[in-house]
Image (cartoon, rainbow, N blue to C red):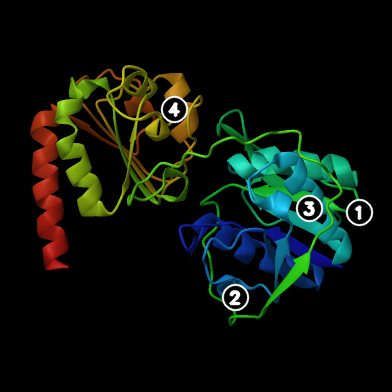
Amino acid sequence: MSVLIFTEASNGKLKKSSLEAVSYGNKIAGLLGTQAIALSFNGAGADLSELGKYGASKVILGKNPSLANFDSQVYAAAIAEVAGAVSASVIITVNDSTGKAVAPRISARLKAGLVAGAITLPNTDGGFKVTKNVFSGKAKAQYNIVSSVKVLSLTPNAVQPVLSGNPVSVEEINLTIGVVSKTMIKEVKRVATDKVALPEAELVVSAGRGLKGPENWGMVEDMANILGAATACSRPVADIGWRPHHEHVGQTGIAVRPNLYIAIGISGAIQHLAGVNQSKTIVVINKDPEAPFFKAADYGVVGDAFEVIPRLNEAFKKFKSAN
């Protein structure tokens, strides 16, 4: 019996969400009296042995030519194959775009109960009860998984990665998989950026149509650079081409859960709130005191962004230079 955690790397670095998943899986392994095993299909130049520092007692690099590009059917079959080889009773993925595509397929293959979007450690007292957010974060629900194999996808930033061990050796294994991809990939385009990726960001600075035009985004980017934050935007801003679509956050864009979300000139439509309301702290800056976003905010500033943001940026610079 073991706990198997699927991890990913990008641009030579292990994803923060994967480190969270390994820490989470290690704690579950402790509850069950077993070991945590990390799995990756593409090291992307990262040092996979570092996963041992976050609780993995073993790291497996699965190899097969069909794993070169992401295909949810192939990935699910490969993860299920490794799960069988290591007798995994719990399989963990991150509840990101990859996890949302793969976890249900693993569940179906292994006839395993699935909780997508777990936010806490399972309660193993008389069962295996897992809590997740429901109704766009307005409530929580607890599910008891009764199948022998259990699949969990962890909500990013729900737990903090914890250093608890040392680097471990990486074992490469060749996988048979036995599933032929039904998808033909002709070209892969990646967004080239040196900024923090939105799904990985702990700080997010976001803006909407209140900025009046793309030429005014400089002060938003300045704030993000000062804070070391990712930049984001509302859907209308992406739709009219002021900002790229990969920055669109909300129900129909990227759902984020940072420690701090700063919303500038965004009214707070329900579709936007659904994608950001799990942020731990929300700061809203809007000149309209009746903006719906203020009802969801932890802190609010009623004022013109063109006056407030430059002053905040100066204050942030002074604070950072003094600390």
Residue 120 to residue 54: above or below? above
| Circle 4 residue | 273
Question: Which is nearer the N-term, disc 2 or disc 3?
Answer: 2
Give the Cα distance between marks 1 and 3.
Answer: 19 Å
Q: Mark on residue 78?
A: 3
Give the Cα distance between marks 4 and 1.
Answer: 37 Å
SS label for mark 3 = helix
Amino acid type indicated by mark 3: Ala
SS label for mark 4 = helix
Whether tag 3 and tag 4 are in contact, CB under 8 A, the answer is: no
Question: Which is nearer the N-term, disc 1 or disc 3?
Answer: 3
- Quadrant of residue 322 within the rendered picture: bottom left
Whether tag 1 and tag 3 are in contact, CB under 8 A, the answer is: no
Q: Residues within 10 Å of mark 3 (few under 14, many from 20)?
A: many
Residue 142 at least partly seen:
no
Q: Position of residue 317 (x, y in %)?
A: 12, 55
Give the Cα distance between marks 1 and 2.
Answer: 29 Å
| Circle 1 residue | 148
Q: Position of residue 85 (x, y in %)?
A: 87, 64
| Circle 2 residue | 49
